[in-house]
């Protein structure tokens, strides 16, 4: 499963999705892939909140510790992922609610043929479903149900 940026935020205990994500990690952490794009988006968001650089560094160190505990891997950076994401942004998200980062994450999921893990409504909307061959998104709840089968 490709982790949406929301997954990185849900690693923090004060996040409302933390417990659900923790359950997913305990069942399948080794199946989760962190894309560098998600880390970059998180960095931009944290920086916009005027956090100290040392606080941002601590957050990423915590993420890396959790990544090691659950054997989560990082996706290799591939130019084809970016190209696919830009294509998706222009063709599907053009003047819609999805963000550029959303389209890049979908591009990675499509290219790697893996589901995108995240609760973001855009991934589960009719704007996306059925319009991208091979794209599948799982909410945390969906992932838990699938893993529990």
Image (cartoon, grey):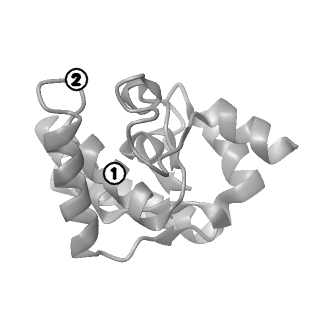
| Quarter of the image where the C terminus is located | top right
Name the residue: 66% across, 60% down. 29
Tell which of 55 and 92 is nearer to you.
Answer: 92
Marking on residue 10: none
Left/right placement of residue 101 relative to residue 68 reads left
Residue annotated with mark 1: 105
Tell which of 39 and 107 is nearer to you.
Answer: 107
| Quarter of the image where the N terminus is located | bottom right
Left/right placement of residue 11 relative to residue 40 reads right
Residue annotated with mark 2: 97
Within 10 Å of disc 2 (Cα), the crowding (few <14, some 14-19, many 20+) is few
Placement of 118 over or under 53, stated as above or below: above
Q: Residue furthest right?
A: 149
Within 10 Å of disc 1 (Cα), the crowding (few <14, some 14-19, many 20+) is many
Label 1 to label 2, Cα distance in Å? 15 Å
Circle nearer the N terminus (1, 2):
2
CB-based contact (under 8 Å), mark 1 and mark 2: no
Tell which of 124 and 9 is nearer to you.
Answer: 124
């Amino acid at each position: 499963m490709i982790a949406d940026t929301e997954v990185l935020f849900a690693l923090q205990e004060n996040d409302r999705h933390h417990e659900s994500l923790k359950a997913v990690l305990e069942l399948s952490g080794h199946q989760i892939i962190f894309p560098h794009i998600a880390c970059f988006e998180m960095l931009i968001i944290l920086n916009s909140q005027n956090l100290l650089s040392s606080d941002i560094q601590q957050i990423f160190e915590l993420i890396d510790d959790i990544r090691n505990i659950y054997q989560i891997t990082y996706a290799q950076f591939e130019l084809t992922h970016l190209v696919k994401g830009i294509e998706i942004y222009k063709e599907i998200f053009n003047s819609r609610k999805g963000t550029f980062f959303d389209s890049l994450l979908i591009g990675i999921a499509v290219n790697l043929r893996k589901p995108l893990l995240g609760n973001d409504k855009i991934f589960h909307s009719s704007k996306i479903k059925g319009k991208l061959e091979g794209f599948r998104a799982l909410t945390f709840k969906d992932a838990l149900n699938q893993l529990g089968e």
